[in-house]
Image (cartoon, helix red, strand yellow):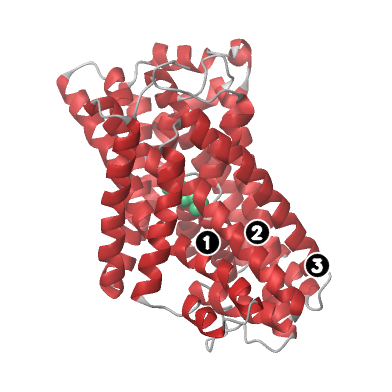
Amino acid sequence: MSASRGGFSSRFGFIMAAAGSAVGLGNIWGFPTQTASNGGAAFVLVYLVLAFCLAYPAFMAELLIGRYGQANAVTSMQKMSRNLWQKRFAFIVGFSGIICAALILSFYGILAGWMMSYAIEPVTTTLGFNEASSWLTSQSIARNLIFSALFMMLTISIIRRGVEDGIEKWSKRLMPMLIGLLILLIIYVFTLDGSREGFAAYLNPDISRVFEPDLLINALGSAFFSLSLGTSVMVIYGSYISKKENLVTLGAQVTLIDVSIAFLAGLLIIPSMYVAQAQGVAIFSDDGSLISGPNLVFEVLPTLFDGMGGIGLFVGFGFFVLMSIAALTSSISMLEGPVSFIVERHNIERKKATTFVGLGIFIISTLIILNFDVLFGFVISLSTVYGQPLIAMLCCIFVGWIWQRSDVLAEIKQGNDNVEHGLFWKIWPWYTKFICPSAIAIVFFHSL
Ligand code: PFF
């Protein structure tokens, strides 16, 4: 950890921060809804395989780039470059990642704002403010602007404090809360009628669907989004880890936490849908598929909470607080990517840079809110469907083909003297060089 730029003070701090970035709306909302619309357990199976076989190696590539470079994504990659063309390539890859993080934050902040407004609704309902409740749960430009602004202010206030006092401290507080809330909600749903059927739908794979192209593409996209790949975020988090830490193990632990929480979220959401069905709520659309997307979280689940009577207010509150916390630990990482770049490359003080970048991204969110039908889906596709896989692929190419092999191996060995005897050492370097970029490219071009 360098004194001037800050860093994580402990292994636990890093794990919570990186898992905090990874675990977000993608896990608790995206993954279960994708599972619901892609054949249940078959999707879960493919997701697990892709997360460990493709996303984890790419995730390690980004962490290693950052720890080697000890700087933001652009500077770190330029340190590995040996000629002008490589430096230019490094700039393009690093900077695109930073822009991708900013774009993701611009729509993620809107979604997170919805989660916050739905979390407040049970409170206004309890107090008898019915008009406020219906305002909080109806789409409007005013509500979207106000709650995205609030969420962005929360994100900015954490990032202004820096790595240890902001990112690490808040991730250490919020992540255990999130895991606790998630487990409590699962236990509660398990006691309700209809949940068994939901567990069965979630856990029995229809193996015939495993090789469906759409399922593969969606699972790959989810895994990359979930591990925050292709956004410079894991590069910058990698740069804040001490050289004494064993990065191979840390990376595996974060991947495991991320995947486990997605799996747990499925255990909450899919059975909840069947509980809702037992209470008379329609959970299948007209074409026979399970309802997914925004309708699932903002219509099916709230109807379920309403049907629970008084306790439903607490459960609904708990659920949307859980969503808001998950969003916040991810959004801080998205803001850190561009902020670290501006602080380090342009010598601007952190607090100023954070406010400046946060405001800039909020302006993009405002444009999206004002032109919702045109921009919302477009920004999501641009950043997550095209941006993330492509940039993650370029990072693998960078590590495999440009970074000097002896330097890669020396970096892997830091904090991990025995690595030469392990599987990672034998497989990962060539895997990242050949398999990862080709597999990502195949799935990516197939999806076009
Ligand atoms: N991993 C987050 C999620 O699953 O919700 C989303 C995310 C965080 C994407 C950070 C990109 C990023 F840079």
User: Mark 3 or mark 2, which is nearer the start of the sequence?
Assistant: 3
Front-most of residues 341 and 427 = 341
Viewer can see residue 43 = no
Instruction: Tell me residue 438's x, y (percent).
Output: 38, 41
The quarter holding residue 254 reads top right
Helix, strand or loop at label 1? It is: helix
Vertically, is 270 above or below 92? below
The quarter holding residue 129 reads bottom right
Which residue is labeled 2 in the image?
265
User: Mark 1 or mark 2, which is nearer the start of the sequence?
Assistant: 1
Instruction: Tell me residue 192's x, y (percent).
Output: 81, 74
Amino acid type for the residue under numbered disc 1: Gly
- From the viewer's perspective, tell me whether residue 236 is left or right of residue 192: left
Instruction: Tell me residue 76's x, y (percent).
Output: 33, 24
Viewer can see residue 234 = yes
- From the viewer's perspective, tell me whether residue 324 is left or right of residue 346: right
Give the Cα separation between the discs numbered 2 and 3.
Answer: 13 Å
Amino acid type for the residue under numbered disc 2: Ala
Residue at 35% from the left image edge and 66% from the top image edge: 145
Helix, strand or loop at label 2? It is: helix
Which residue is labeled 3 in the image?
190
Residue at 57% from the left image edge and 53% from the top image edge: 325
Helix, strand or loop at label 3? It is: helix
Give the Cα separation between the discs numbered 3 and 1.
Answer: 21 Å
Instruction: Tell me if the residue at label 1 has its CB under 8 Å from ligand 1.
Output: yes
Which residue is labeled 1 in the image?
30
- From the viewer's perspective, tell me whether residue 283 is left or right of residue 143: right
User: Mark 1 or mark 3, which is nearer the start of the sequence?
Assistant: 1
Disc 1 crowd rating (10 Å Cα; few below 14, some 14-19, many 20+) is many
Amino acid type for the residue under numbered disc 3: Phe
